[in-house]
Amino acid sequence: MSSELPPNEQPTTSQSRSMSGPVMGGVVLIVLGSIFLLQSLGVDFPFNFNWWAFFILIPAFLLGKSAWETYKANGEQVNKEVRSKAVGAAAVAVIGLSFLAGIDMGKIWPIFLILGGIGVLLGGMGGSDQ
């Protein structure tokens, strides 16, 4: 008996190379554990480190990854779904990074206007709206 899969059931290169949920979760736990260990050992970070901000960055990363996978699945064409995922990922990443670095949101709120403008421009620039 052959262990080879039929051609229509073989994983594509992007599927075989992407990190699965358990692998990503394991990496996140290792990074967070390492940071906590360093802090408990007295290692000072050069910036105001808010470890909980990583919990905001995780969805941003996953949304960006989803936008990339959707882009690839659509034959490398930007559509409405790719645009909304990419702009959403950027907005969530800005929030997470500002908390991580201890930046006052009152100073960076115009970034959200810029991201909205980018979303509007991408919506008006070609690409299918499927």
Image (cartoon, helix red, strand yellow):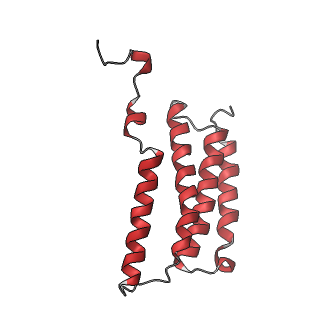
Rendered-image quadrant of the N terminus: top left
Q: Position of residue 18 (x, y in %)?
A: 41, 42
Residue 77 on image: x %, y %: 55, 34
Farthest residue, direction front: 1
Q: Does 76 sit above or below residue 115?
A: above
Residue at 56% x, 70% y: name it: 53
Left or right of 71 in this view: 31: left
Q: Is residue 68 visible?
A: yes
Q: Nearer the viewer, residue 64 or 15?
A: 15
Place of residue 56 in the rendered image (x, y in percent of width and height, measured from the top left)? 58, 64
Which residue is at 69% across, 34% downward? 129
Q: Position of residue 125 (x, y in %)?
A: 65, 41
Residue appearing at x 51%, y 39% in the figure? 69
Tell me, yes or no, if residue 45 can be seen here.
Answer: no
- Asked if residue 112 is positioned above or below residue 72 in the image, the reply reads below
Quadrant housing residue 44: bottom left
Q: Which quarter of the figure has residue 34? A: bottom left
- Drawn side of residue 93 relative to residue 27, left or right: right
Q: Is residue 117 above or below residue 111?
A: above
Residue 41 or residue 58, whichever sits in front: 41
